């Protein structure tokens, strides 16, 4: 955490520390407190005129003294949380009330599910936080309730995954690596491919409840109870998992750790982003629908000259909704969705990234139909040949290119495309040419226009009480040039103003932290136009004109419409 350098920054950090504390962000609060406590009074007053120094230093020391008691309180809260955490861990496996409750809540909906929600492999590298895991029951329920997607009427009822005809002929990669899982056969007959016997067919009577993908009781191995790395050691592979497919039930082999890492860390977040929750970007939405969603929904139409694109690139300034669009695509498609943070893959797993790329695509084929989303693709696929380029990243890039060649349309018996690559970047000009060629469709995701910003305000303020003086059109005008993320920040900042004002008053009244905590009801006051104007003056636009020109030029040269 950056140390405050002057009295103004000290004041702001203390304010933030207390706000975080009140909102329950204890770690963030502690970091702010510690930053203020870590500077000495001498450092802080060094820049002041001589005659002011000693009294200012004295004042600051008094403030620090007071802060220490707040930190003590905070530490007690944190310790209590830790104790609760270890209590939970110690009791895990005895009675898991939360899980029982979740399964009870999900039970009636399960009856209605004709097709299971898409497995989502999210954050290859950034596993979901406990909070994210907690939210997971929602998407499935929502999807069932809403019929599963927002597709145009004629495409409303996509075929169940098991009904989508599957490609049979193995790709070059499949031939040279692990075999692709053979698709389940109708009526339990055995298939005729080169791959291993279908796991459902093999189990005969077992097929009804586990073997057939999409069966009511089919349990996706990566959705529940994915074993933790250490726990899984020596326990063999989960039935029906990719690991079992590669190494059999023992689950042991040279790449078992990496596969387990992928299975465990990339798995269980279902994106629940609908087109409606994304403001503006109408053209991008329809291009994505045409390029990614429809080929998966109606593969028979997308053949020959209409073959789907090998890969689709979304490029544009940061914070314009590229990641949200990718998640909306996944929510719509009901395909397996692998969300890969390319930059983390390139840095965190440097030695293994090349192998990870290969395994990722092999898994994608195994769980096909699949969409792989590479966020920040430039981190994996920047221009080659640079003298500073690391040998390892050269190899990763080469592997990515080979694998992407393998995902092109295979004009097999059913001509079904099974794996779709979707990528996003803020730096399209850094992309390797060969990779750019493979990302055949290149969609510009621009800053929001006035209508988009209006929708952004509406979406962000849905649950916020607004004062009668709030005029959204005026705010839309004042946020020209702001990205979607900037507008969201403005709304967040404005929504916090009431709390800030109330806290300031409470501090002046000498209220204790506990008393302030009890003011929760009082801080939910309507947000006023003045709050918004102040928030806009606090949040600057994050994209400059120069960058915008660069995107426009690149779009002209390489973009698709
Ligand atoms: N069009 C939009 N509609 C609704 N929210 C948006 C939109 N664009 C941006 N946002 C807000 O900004 C946040 C960041 O968006 P997102 O991560 O999708 O942007 P991005 O283009 O992928 O950014 P980056 O390139 O930095 O990864 C979102 O969580 C959302 O709150």
Image (spheres, rainbow, N blue to C red):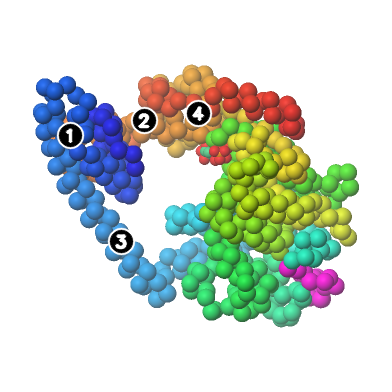
Tell me if mark 3 has few (under 14), some (14-19) or many (20+) residues whose alpha carbon lies within 10 angstroms of its own: few
Q: Which mark is residue 62?
A: none
Q: Nearer the viewer, mark 1 or mark 2?
A: 1
Q: Position of residue 456 (x, y in %)?
A: 53, 31
The first of marks 1 and 3 along the sequence is: 1
Q: Is residue 65 magenta?
A: no
Q: Which mark is residue 82?
A: 3
Residue 290 or 256: which is nearer the viewer?
A: 256
Whether residue 111 is situated above or below residue 43 in the rendered picture: below
Residue tagged 4: 542
Q: CA distance from mark 1 to mark 4?
A: 36 Å
What is the magenta range? 178-195
Residue tagged 2: 526
- Quadrant holding the N terminus: top left
The first of marks 3 and 2 along the sequence is: 3
Badge 2 vs badge 4, beta-carbon distance below 8 Å: no
Q: Secondary structure at mark 4?
A: loop
Badge 1 vs badge 4, beta-carbon distance below 8 Å: no
The residue located at (61%, 49%) in the rendering is 390
């Amino acid at each position: 955490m950056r140390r405050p350098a002057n009295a103004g920054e000290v004041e702001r950090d203390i304010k933030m520390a207390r706000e975080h504390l009140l909102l329950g962000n204890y770690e963030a609060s502690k970091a702010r407190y510690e930053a203020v406590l870590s500077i000495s009074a001498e450092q802080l007053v060094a820049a002041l005129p001589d005659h002011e120094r000693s009294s200012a230093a004295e004042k600051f020391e008094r403030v620090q003294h007071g802060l220490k008691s707040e930190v003590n309180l905070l530490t007690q809260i944190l310790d209590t949380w830790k104790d609760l955490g270890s209590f939970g861990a110690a009791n895990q496996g005895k009675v898991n009330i939360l899980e029982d409750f979740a399964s009870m809540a999900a039970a009636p909906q399960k009856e209605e599910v004709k097709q299971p929600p898409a497995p989502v492999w999210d954050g290859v590298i950034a596993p979901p936080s406990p909070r994210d895991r907690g939210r997971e029951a929602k998407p499935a329920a929502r999807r069932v309730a809403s019929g599963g997607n927002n597709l145009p009427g004629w495409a409303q009822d996509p075929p169940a995954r098991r009904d989508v005809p599957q490609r049979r002929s193995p790709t070059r990669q499949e031939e040279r690596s692990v075999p692709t899982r053979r698709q389940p056969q109708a009526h339990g007959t055995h298939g005729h491919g080169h791959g291993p016997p279908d796991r459902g067919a093999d189990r005969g009577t077992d097929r009804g409840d586990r073997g057939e993908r999409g069966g009511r009781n089919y349990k996706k191995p990566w959705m529940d109870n994915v074993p933790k790395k250490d726990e899984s050691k020596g326990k063999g592979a989960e039935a029906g998992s990719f690991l079992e497919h590669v190494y059999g039930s023992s689950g042991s082999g040279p790449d078992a750790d990496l596969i387990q890492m992928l299975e465990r860390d990339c798995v269980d977040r279902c994106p629940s982003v609908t087109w409606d929750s994304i403001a503006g970007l109408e053209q991008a939405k329809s291009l994505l629908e045409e390029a990614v969603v429809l080929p998966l929904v109606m593969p028979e139409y997308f053949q020959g000259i209409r073959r789907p694109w090998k890969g689709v690139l979304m490029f544009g300034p940061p914070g314009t909704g590229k990641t949200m669009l990718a998640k909306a695509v996944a929510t719509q498609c009901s395909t397996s969705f692998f969300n890969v943070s390319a930059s983390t893959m390139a840095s965190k797993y440097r030695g293994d990234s090349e192998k990870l790329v290969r395994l990722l695509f092999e898994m994608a084929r195994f769980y096909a139909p699949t969409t792989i989303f590479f966020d920040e693709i430039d981190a994996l696929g920047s221009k080659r040949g640079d003298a500073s380029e690391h040998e390892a990243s050269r190899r990763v890039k080469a592997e990515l290119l080979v694998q992407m060649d393998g995902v092109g349309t295979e004009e097999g018996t059913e001509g079904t495309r099974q794996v779709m690559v979707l990528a996003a970047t803020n730096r399209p000009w850094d992309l390797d040419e060969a990779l750019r060629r493979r990302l055949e469709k290149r969609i510009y995701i621009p800053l929001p226009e006035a209508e988009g910003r209006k929708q952004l305000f509406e979406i962000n303020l849905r649950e916020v009480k607004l004062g009668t003086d709030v005029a959204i059109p005026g705010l839309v005008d004042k946020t020209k040039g702001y990205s979607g993320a900037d507008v969201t920040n403005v709304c967040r900042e404005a929504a916090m103003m009431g709390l800030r004002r109330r806290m300031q008053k409470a501090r002046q009244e000498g209220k204790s932290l506990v008393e302030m905590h009890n003011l929760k009801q009082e801080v939910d006051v309507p947000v006023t136009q003045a709050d918004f104007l102040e928030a806009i003056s606090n949040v600057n636009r994050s994209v400059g004109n120069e960058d915008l020109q660069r995107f426009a030029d690149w779009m002209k040269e390489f973009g698709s419409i």
